Amino acid sequence: MPDDLTMPPAKALEEAQRLLDADRPFHAHEVLEAVWKASPEPERELWRGLAQVAVGITHLRRGNTRGAEALLSRAADRLVPYETETPHSIDVKGVVQRVRELAVHPENGPVTLRLTI
């Protein structure tokens, strides 16, 4: 991914989902991180949380369950304030639920995650 990647939220979610589905969570993280860095202040923590989810999944894939648990828990906490809004049709409640499940039971993979409703 280029360092100066810019995408509108809908396109970034589509690309991040494609990368997650292809078992490339670190690349999904890079897409989500690009949106996080470019997003307006009210949405920054949403995109930061989604980027952390992707890194947490990366840790799971690499066998670092302690790192995954910490990142996934932090990501879920960061996403909770957005649960009632569903910005950009993001399934925040569903993501939080799946991420919390993975943080507690990482063995319940494979990691599948739908970002949008």
Image (spheres, helix red, strand yellow):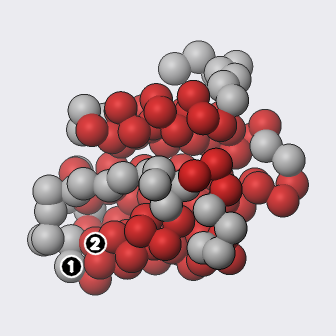
Marks 1 and 2 close (CB-CB < 8 Å): yes
Report the residue at 68% width, 67% height from top: 85
Q: Hey, what amino acid is under mark 1?
A: His
SS under mark 1: loop
Residue 10 visible to the viewer: yes
Q: Which x, y percent locates residue 64?
A: 26, 62
Q: Which x, y percent locates residue 14?
A: 47, 33
From the viewer's side, name the closer residue of 43 and 63. Answer: 43
Provide the residue designation for mark 1. Answer: 105
33 over 2 or under it: above or below: below
52 over 75 or under it: above or below: above
Report the residue at 57% width, 28% height from top: 11
Q: Which x, y percent locates residue 101?
A: 29, 78
* Side (left or right) of 108 relative to 48: left
Question: Residue 61: which disc?
Answer: none
Q: Hey, what amino acid is under mark 2?
A: Leu
Give the image quarter of residue 5: top right
* Side (left or right) of 46 relative to 102: right
Residue 78 visible to the viewer: no
Give the image quarter of residue 42: bottom right
From the viewer's side, name the closer residue of 66 and 33. Answer: 33
Q: Which x, y percent locates residue 10?
A: 60, 35
Question: Residue 102: which disc?
Answer: 2
* Side (left or right) of 116 relative to 79: left
Mark 2 neighbour density, 10 Å: few (under 14) some (14–19) many (20 or more) = many
Residue lying at the far right in this picture: please name it.
41
From the viewer's side, name the closer residue of 15 and 58. Answer: 15
* Side (left or right) of 99 relative to 13: left
